[in-house]
Structure formats: C-alpha cells, structure tokens
C-alpha cells in the first residue's frame, strides 16, 4: 500500500480478542490466526476502526513508515480492507515499546475450517440459513 488510505478490520471474516495487552486475530474464512505484539495491538485497534496510517502515526508518535508497513501487512493478510468511510483521527495514544509485529499461524487451520459456522449465516432473527438461502432445519 503506497497510498495513505483509511483501512478497517475485515469484519465479519476477522474476529479479535485482546489477552494481557496482546491481540489474537482469527480469520474465519482462511482458518489462519495471528498474534500481535502490544504495539501491534494498539495500531490494529486504531487502524481497524477506519483510520489512515498517517493519522495513527501522528496520534501515537510512531514512525509513519512503520505504521504504513503494518497497515500493508494487515491488508496483505486480508485482515483489513480499504475503509468505506474514514473515522475521525484518534486522540493521542501511548503505544508500548517494541515493534508492531504480526505473527501468522496455520497449525489450527484444518480445525478452524471444520467448524460448521463456515457453512451458515444467521438471518435477522438469528436462525441459521445455508449459504444457498434455505433455512437449516435441526437434525434429530
């Protein structure tokens, strides 16, 4: 990504949870999961909300090239997508020391892809609907 375009988390395909200041991201479509460093976690939260890398760099005091490279990595792994609308610039945020890094893991890919949730959507009432649009009936 050479341009300074806003990006956002690739929801609903990507879910994340923070444990002790480090985020774990799961890409439900690919079955890959990722671990972020504490610095990467802060940048993920700010970028994933629909912000430009330059705005995040300004708010965090991080090197703009580091933030841009991190945003490029998120896009390359399909964890983020170009944002439809830009979020307001964040207020000043303190980022933990160390590099913003993204580690990719595939050791649970087969297991994550076996999860039947990949074959279903939920309608407005929360009922499971097959990808073909038909209601999924419970089996006895």
Image (spheres, rainbow, N blue to C red):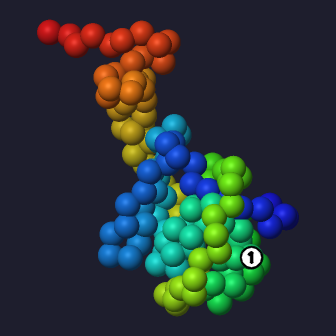
Q: Is residue 14 visible?
A: yes
Classify residue 123 by image quadrant. top left
Split into 4 quadrants, where in the image is the N terminus?
A: bottom right
Secondary structure of residue under mark 1: helix
- Residue 22 drawn at (x, y percent): 41, 72
Split into 4 quadrants, where in the image is the C terminus?
A: top left
Apparent side of residue 84 relative to residue 43 in the rendered image (left or right): right
Above or below, comparing residue 84 to residue 88 in the picture = above
- Residue 37 drawn at (x, y percent): 49, 75
- What's the residue at 42%, 16% (across, down)? 130
Q: Residue at label 1?
A: 54
- What's the residue at 32%, 28% (across, down)? 126
Classify residue 87 by image quadrant. bottom right
Of residue 78 and residue 93, the one placed in the foreground of this image is 93
Above or below, comparing residue 138 to residue 46 in the picture = above
Q: Hey, which residue is sitting farthest right in the picture?
A: 2
- What's the residue at 48%, 18% (across, down)? 131
Of residue 90 and residue 43, the one placed in the foreground of this image is 90
- Residue 21 drawn at (x, y percent): 38, 76
Q: Residues within 10 Å of mark 1 (few under 14, many from 20)?
A: many
Classify residue 101 by image quadrant. bottom right
- What's the residue at 38%, 61% (across, down)? 17
Q: Hey, which residue is sitting farthest left in the picture?
A: 140
């Amino acid at each position: 990504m050479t341009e300074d375009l806003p990006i956002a988390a690739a929801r609903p395909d990507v879910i994340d949870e923070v444990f002790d200041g480090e985020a774990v991201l799961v890409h439900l479509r690919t079955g890959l999961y990722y671990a972020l460093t504490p610095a990467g976690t802060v940048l993920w939260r700010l970028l994933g909300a629909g912000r430009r890398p330059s705005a995040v760099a300004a708010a965090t005091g991080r090197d703009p090239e580091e933030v841009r490279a991190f945003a490029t990595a998120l896009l390359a792994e399909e964890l983020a997508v170009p944002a439809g609308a830009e979020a307001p610039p964040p207020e000043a945020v303190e980022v933990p020391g160390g590099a913003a890094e993204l580690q990719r893991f595939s050791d649970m890919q087969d297991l994550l892809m076996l999860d039947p949730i990949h074959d279903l959507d939920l309608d407005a009432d929360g009922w499971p609907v097959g990808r073909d649009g038909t209601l999924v009936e419970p089996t006895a």
